[in-house]
Amino acid sequence: MKFDATLLFFDLADIPTYAQAAEALGFDGFWLAETQADPFLGLTLAAEHSQKMDLGSGIAVAFPRSPTVTAMMAWNIAKMSNGRFHLGLGSQVKAHNVLRYGVQWEKPIKKMRETIQAIRAVWYCWQTGEPLDYVGEFFKLQLMTPFFNPGPIAHPDIPIYISAVNEQMLRLAGEECDGVLLHALHTVPYITEYALPHIETGLAKRGLKRADFGVTTAVFAIPTDDPTYAAWAKAHAQQQISFYLSTPAYRIVAEIQGWQATARELSQMARNNQWADMPALITDDMLDTIAVTGTWAELPALIHQKYGSLLDRVSYYLPFIPNENEAGWQATINGFK
């Protein structure tokens, strides 16, 4: 199991320092989310200031970018990083696509499938010199002149991951992708009884097995070495879990665990802007089911015990900041290694 650093928020000016610190500590990968800054810009800087770590977008929002734009960004970072880049894409939800990005919301499963296929068609054109020819319902790509063709690179097989929660996107991940980014709001029964069976159904369509596919996620971790930080980490986990459980897109986890009533109540509280009161509904039993609690050094063994071979890569749903909790991060990294 590989252990990664995932940054949900970052300033581009800080990325060189963050990437160098993460690699020095021994993280296996360095993933950037698309929240308040463009992950591709950050990963370009990370590629320049690291040598060994895998780099990944976790996630970049797919639909506001054309497949060719995304293909170009990924191609450049893969070349710059000597093949260390993983392209992680996500659909986001309808409201964000329409009201934040200003793009249409249309058949997200089919559009994501075409996005992945179209990106690979562009890469194939650049690597082989064959004409660009991809025609689907949403994209018609049939023009690539030499002036706009960056040409082949040494590591053209760029892994594509997508974020997936529900049945159709999980199956799509198995059918089209190299891996999946599971949401931090998950439980072991959700993975074993729901996510993996749907992924494996998709994999079977192309003659692949679970061993041919990467599963990665963030885990709500509560390190207990320092009581003050432990209290903050617990409150942070409860706040985030309450927010995610209030969101209908993640309701499947509540259904599997029998938390539907709590999820409905959280949704109503969210509509009433009762954000500060929502974490109180996350009981210790719910927290124990979702999160992992122990010292920094104990957490890797606890995660292995909890997940076994279900996961290939994991990160903590905690902010990684250079020179903060460095001994703790190092103890965890040593534990995973």
Image (spheres, grey):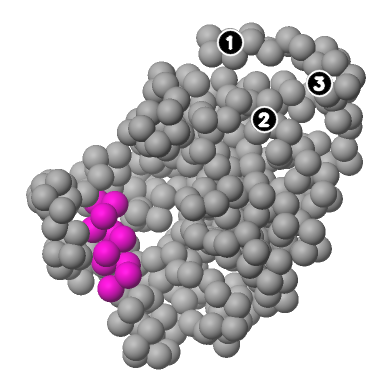
Image quadrant containing the C terminus: bottom right
- The x, y position of residue 166, in whole percent, is 36, 36
Residue 303 visible, this orientation: no
Label 3 and label 1: CA atoms lie apart by 17 Å
Residue designated by label 1 = 136
Residue designated by label 2 = 69
User: Magenta stretch: residue 240 in it?
Assistant: yes
Residue designated by label 3 = 125
Residue 53 visible, this orientation: yes
- The x, y position of residue 219, in whole percent, is 43, 63
Image-quadrant location for residue 232: bottom left
Q: Amino acid at mark 3?
A: Cys
Q: Residue at x 39, y 66 (%)?
A: 220
Compared across the picture, whether 52 is left or right of 329 comes to: right
Q: From this view, report whether residue 193 is shown above or below residue 148.
A: below
Image-quadrant location for residue 106: top left
